[in-house]
Image: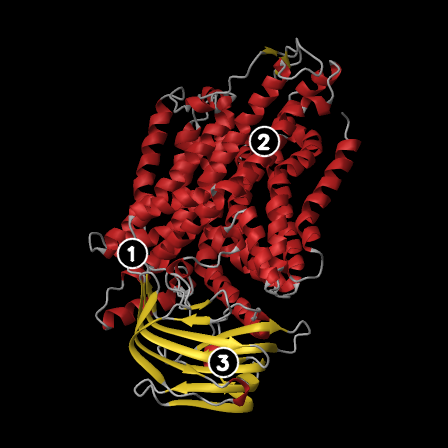
Amino acid sequence: MLRTTDRYILREVIPPFGLGLLVFTFLLMLPPIMEVAEDLIAKGVDGLTVIRIMLTLLPQGLGVTIPMALLIGVLMGLGRMSSDRETVALQACGVSIYRMFYPLVLLAVFAGVTTCYILVIALPDANQSFREITYRTVASRAAGEVKPRVFYSDFPNVMLYVREVSTAGDGWSDVFLADTRRSEQPDIYVAMQGHVVLDREKRLVDIVLQNGARHVVDPTERDVYEVHKFDEIVIGLDAESVFPRTGPQRGLAELTIPQLQEEAIRMESLGLSPHRPIMEIHRKFSIPVACFVFVLIGLGLGVTSRKDGRLASFALGIAVIFTYYVIMYGGEAMAKGGLVSPHLAMWLPNLALGLLGLVLVVWRSGSVERRVALPFFSPHLADTSSVSSTEGKTPTTVINVSQRGLRPLTILDWYVTKLYLRWATVAFVGLLGIFYIATFIDLSDKLFKGETTALTLLEYFWYATPQFAYYVVPVSALMATLITVGLLTKTSELTVMKACGISLYRVSLPIFLCSLVWSGFLFGLSESILAQANRRAETLNQQIRVGATQTVDVLNRKWIISSNGAIYHYLYFDRDLSELTSLSVYEFEGQPWELSRRTFAEHATFTNAWEGREVWMRDFGGTSGSVLPYAAAVTQRLPFIEPPEYFQTERPDAELMSFGELETYIEELRASGFDVVSLVVALHRKASFPFVTLILTLIALPFAVTTGPRGALYGVGVGISLAFTYWIILSVFGAIGSAGIIAPALAAWAPNVLFGASAGYFLLTVRT
């Protein structure tokens, strides 16, 4: 039976617990929303399917965020009680710190059981459902996936390139197809038209080409070259590669406990170490048990006499969470090296932090006045005095407004700015820390398995930080506005300001100015270091995950289009030596689109120009289809090939370019007849997105005045909901604009227009 004090403690802990769960889950879901959901919408996937796909990702996030949120909730709830001396009063009334543990244990049981259910039952099925739904959706729209003048490699053993795609969806024009089962000398198909036929029920996958020619060269006797003209040819693909009967293969996280046990037995029978499936089994139970460990830590750190309350609690929680996962992945690395048993590895963080929590609780029980304080979070505000009410109500802070009017930098401005910046800093640091933790969790297994180094991981964090900040700054500005104005409303300070003749608009002027500064910061960031940092971070991310760059990327793209429309294919490019291996050059002529010349060099080295070794070349007789004599040379200059810099630099995505670079790139593509709609949307978004801080600030003000009496936590919850809504609308309109349904400029600016109009309406109707 819960006592009144038990229910009171739960009421203090549950709201920040729910808030933490909302914040952590939102941040973990933000990348899928921006990448997966927007991409699926642009491909024409219906909204219901997109929602289903996003919901299948929730268990993966909740399995991590529930224990994290519980720790934050306990720390913030008890931190608030400690800052108001309520924990001191409880202990003075005979409620010991051990008795406070009782309601928290009940909450830990609920969180632990829920987490265990998610990891053991829901997560395997949800992850597999995500892969299968996404796979079926993409496969069923494979025909629409082929974009003009972009290499398409999703079909097995096929590299496809088309110059034009019919807007009616009935096929492609000017088609180049390479059968890559022979990587050095693939069979080449060049056709005027083509389309794909997919039938999941009949398990049929065919590419149909019309009015073209097939080019075949014998790799052992290169003077034997065949050209076969055709009116129509059907290239059958391996249906099992496109529509596998068993669906995508499950990883360890997607396996149930019996399946993991079978995998461990199978690995043992093969003489392999079964440490990975064994650790995965224990992980499914150690993380739920972490709920009890976090409650113990939260009780030990939360019951203090410190004044900094929830702010320091949030920072302490982030540090504890980071420590937990560092110990966990350190234990995984030690298990791999045979230093500890795989049965023990996943329990090391619980043992270490659980012991620390016990020590802290025992220490706290001796004297509640012992405290762990963070000086940075001491709430010293300027020019305030406390006046207690006559009826025992919460003391009200009254501002000494000695300077009024429209003059800048008054005492009031400094007061509001200091309060706002304090909360903005806390929100920024906290949200940025969550990004770091989530990224560390995602990549740390590569570090502890020895597949990458700590220096590489730190370098990736360094270059990824600008992009993290680009996402975090708008949300931090929104939350800071809601909390600042909400607190002014709750403590009646805003009422006093109005009574002194200062309107809400004037009070909010420093916040408006700060939001403009953040907007300028975001635009300056995107125009200065963001693009370059993203390019480096992308390269490092690929290096960490697979140990090398991607096949069709930077140093080893293998397929690339030259500036004059020729296609290059090579097996490897050595940037240091400026050397290409097994280089093929395919040159084409106009209408009808045909292969005009094919050149091959076993090696090509660049000095002042490219010089090939073991070169052979064939010219074709245009529309006559005749093959001219075979020409070969031991060495031959190849002046028509692009310089090494062309192979070193990838065709960047919009996110990897600044506004000016993207604008120039669009003009070049438009002059060449490319479809640039999606890039134009991205260009306008680069200009519109920085204003999100101003728009969200404007819409936050009336919400903060309305919800302020309910407290800062309620304001944070409203802020996360508004940010989540904005990002969904941003993704939806971006996808619609990329599909050509609405104008690119409208697609990019529509979220700002909608939220700005709403903000204007609420601002004009709120009591100022």
- Residue type at mark 2 is Val
Residue at the top extreme, as displayed: 402
Q: Is residue 559 left or right of residue 11?
A: left
- Residue type at mark 1 is Glu
Element carrying mark 3: strand
| Separation (CA) of disc 3 from disc 1 | 43 Å
Where in the figure is residue 77, as x and y percent of width and height?
A: 51, 32
- Residue type at mark 3 is Leu
**At 54% across and 17% down in the image, what residue appears?**
381
| Separation (CA) of disc 2 from disc 3 | 55 Å
Q: Which residue is mark 3?
A: 595
Element carrying mark 2: helix
Q: Nearer the viewer, residue 103 or 242?
A: 242
Residue at the right extreme, as displayed: 765
Q: Which residue is mark 1?
A: 451
Element carrying mark 1: loop
Q: Nearer the viewer, residue 569 or 518?
A: 569
Who comes first in sequence, dot 2 or dot 3?
Answer: 2
Foreground label between 1 and 2: 2
Who comes first in sequence, dot 1 or dot 2?
Answer: 1
Q: Which residue is mark 2?
A: 517
Does 175 sit above or below residue 514? below
| Separation (CA) of disc 1 from disc 2 | 41 Å
Foreground label between 3 and 1: 3
Please say if the residues under marks 2 and 3 sit with CB atoms less than 8 Å apart.
no
Q: Nearer the viewer, residue 383 or 458?
A: 458
